[in-house]
Amino acid sequence: MLFGDEHVRRYEETDGEVGHDWEGGAPCLVLTTTGRKSGQPRKFALIYQEHEGNYVVVASKGGADSHPGWYLNLQQEPEVGVQVKADRFKARARTASPEEKAEVWPKMTRVWPAYDDYQKKTDRDIPVVILERVA
């Protein structure tokens, strides 16, 4: 799930006090990718869950037939910035394997049930992305 620039700005200004909990309590983080065309930082607020010490996000784009821009960005440059509340860190983003996706998809749909609807709307296999903190 993707939210606007204002959401990101308020999240960053308040260390997530405003914006971490989205509609009904779905937790959000801020992902910073490098624009694949511009080379400039691009920020996105995304619903996440923790899994085995990492953070997981879904490249759903509301069930569109194309991947979201942020996912295309990280495919080109997997080194990203992440902010979860006041915790800011660098991470390496990777697409979950089919086995990993099968394990985390139910966790993601518990927090945002619409992901199942999004998958039904498209023939595209919606990627799950694992964000692994780097030292």
Image: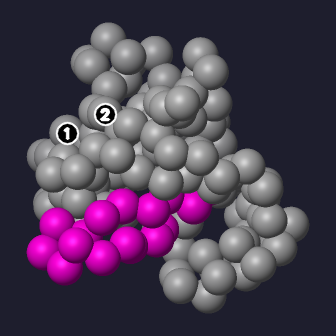
Q: Is residue 34 magenta?
A: yes
Camera sees residue 31 = yes
Residue 128 found in image quarter: top left
Camera sees residue 121 = no
x 62%, y 37%: residue: 49
Q: Nearer the viewer, residue 108 or 41?
A: 41
The residue that mark 1 highlights is 125
Where does the magenta region start and end? 29-44
Using residue 99 as the reference point, say whether residue 51 is left or right of it: right
Furthest-right residue in this view: 17
Question: How far across and how far down the image is residue 88, in percent?
Answer: 66, 52
Element under label 1?
Answer: loop
Mark 1 vs 2: CB contact within 8 A: no
Residue kind at label 2, given as amino acid type = Arg
Quadrant including the C terminus: top right
x 17%, y 67%: residue: 36
Q: Earlier in the sequence, mark 1 or mark 2?
A: 2
Question: How far across and how far down the image is residue 101, in percent?
Answer: 37, 23
The figure's colour scheme reads one colour
Question: How far across and how far down the image is residue 85, in percent?
Answer: 77, 55
Residue 129 against residue 66 in the figure, above or below: above
Predominant SS of the magenta segment: strand
Q: Nearer the viewer, residue 49 or 74?
A: 74
Furthest-top residue in this view: 99
Question: How far across and how far down the image is residue 132, in percent?
Answer: 47, 30
Residue kind at label 1, given as amino acid type = Asp
Which mark identifies residue 94?
A: 2
Residue 66 against residue 8 in the figure, above or below: above
Q: Nearer the viewer, residue 72 or 82?
A: 82
Element under label 2?
Answer: strand
Q: How many marks?
A: 2
